[in-house]
């Protein structure tokens, strides 16, 4: 099966539309979303509706859980907390019901799906090799997919040796052996220095993965954030990928 994997949309409609257009050209069998559909950006209802309509699997992320009131925002930055509060007061009933029905982990095609990590599906940021090896030891399958960090990267482990790196546009991986932990990068708010929207193509028969980056109308997304009165930082960071 060929799968398109996307995550961390964060209410960025122009980015999501660009990624979905790119995915359509690739014509995968399924689309999996790893969570954080809302938060930060200014178009939660539109993004939630598209995620519900277009994704065969959708997980819940920490921002989604904060918006539905299942976790508090004490550990969020001031701008992130402000976006949560705005989204709570703005999102439609349909969006809230959709988010409340999601879980932070799932499994399909011998692949584990987690918003954050196999050992902490909601909160853990997996950014270091030693940390990733510990997570891979706990994952149910040989290959797992994670989001949350907004960084396109991969980790592998074979015979006790670990490896990991950020993945640029077009980077291909052969996943036939060993354990793997893959992060597609963020659709709506990349933090790896590349402002383009990210998604991952996964082939679960050939066991190959390809990273993709897609340009989108960043000014439109930033203008939408400013127009609703969200913190300007959330608009400014889009153009630098941080």
Image: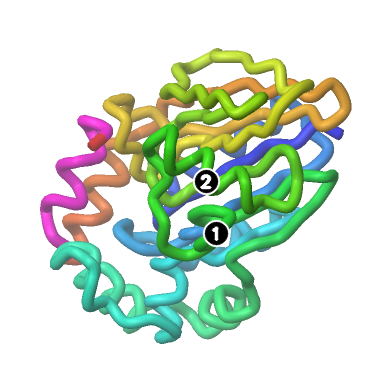
Tell me: residue 113, above or below residue 198.
Answer: below
Quarter of the image with the C terminus is top left
**Residue at (71%, 60%) from the top-left corner?**
106
Proximity of marks 1 and 2: CB atoms separated by less than 8 Å: yes
Closer-to-camera residue (141/236): 141
Closer-to-camera residue (112/42): 112
Magenta region includes residue 27: no
Question: Magenta region: which residues?
Answer: 230-241
Quickly name the residue at label 2.
134
Magenta region includes residue 237: yes
Quickly name the residue at label 1.
119
The residue tagged with tag 1: helix, strand or loop? loop
Assign the magenta stretch its main secondary structure: helix
Circle 2 residues within 10 Å: few <14, some 14–19, many ≥20: few
Q: State which quadrant residue 178 falls in.
A: top right
Q: Is residue 105 left or right of residue 123?
A: right
């Amino acid at each position: 099966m060929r799968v398109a994997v996307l995550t961390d949309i964060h209410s960025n409609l122009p980015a999501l539309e660009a990624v979905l257009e790119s995915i359509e050209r690739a014509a995968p069998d399924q689309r999996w979303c790893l969570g954080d559909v809302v938060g930060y950006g200014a178009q939660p209802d539109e993004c939630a509706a598209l995620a519900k309509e277009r994704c065969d699997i959708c997980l819940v992320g920490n921002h989604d859980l904060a918006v539905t009131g299942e976790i508090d925002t004490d550990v969020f930055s001031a701008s992130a907390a402000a976006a949560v509060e705005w989204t709570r007061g703005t999102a439609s009933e349909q969006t809230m019901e959709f988010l409340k029905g999601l879980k932070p982990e799932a499994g399909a095609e011998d692949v584990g799906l987690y918003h954050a990590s196999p050992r902490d599906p909601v909160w853990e940021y997996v950014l270091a090799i030693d940390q990733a090896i510990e997570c891979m030891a706990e994952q149910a399958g040989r290959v797992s997919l994670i989001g949350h960090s907004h960084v396109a990267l991969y980790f592998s482990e074979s015979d006790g040796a670990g490896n990991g790196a950020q993945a640029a546009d077009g980077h291909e991986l052969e996943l036939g052996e060993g354990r793997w932990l893959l992060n597609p990068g963020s659709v709506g708010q990349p933090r790896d220095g590349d402002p383009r929207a990210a998604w991952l193509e996964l082939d679960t028969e050939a066991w190959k993965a390809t990273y993709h980056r897609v340009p989108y109308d960043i000014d439109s997304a930033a203008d939408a954030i400013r127009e609703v009165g969200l913190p300007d930082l959330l608009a400014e960071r889009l153009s630098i990928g941080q």
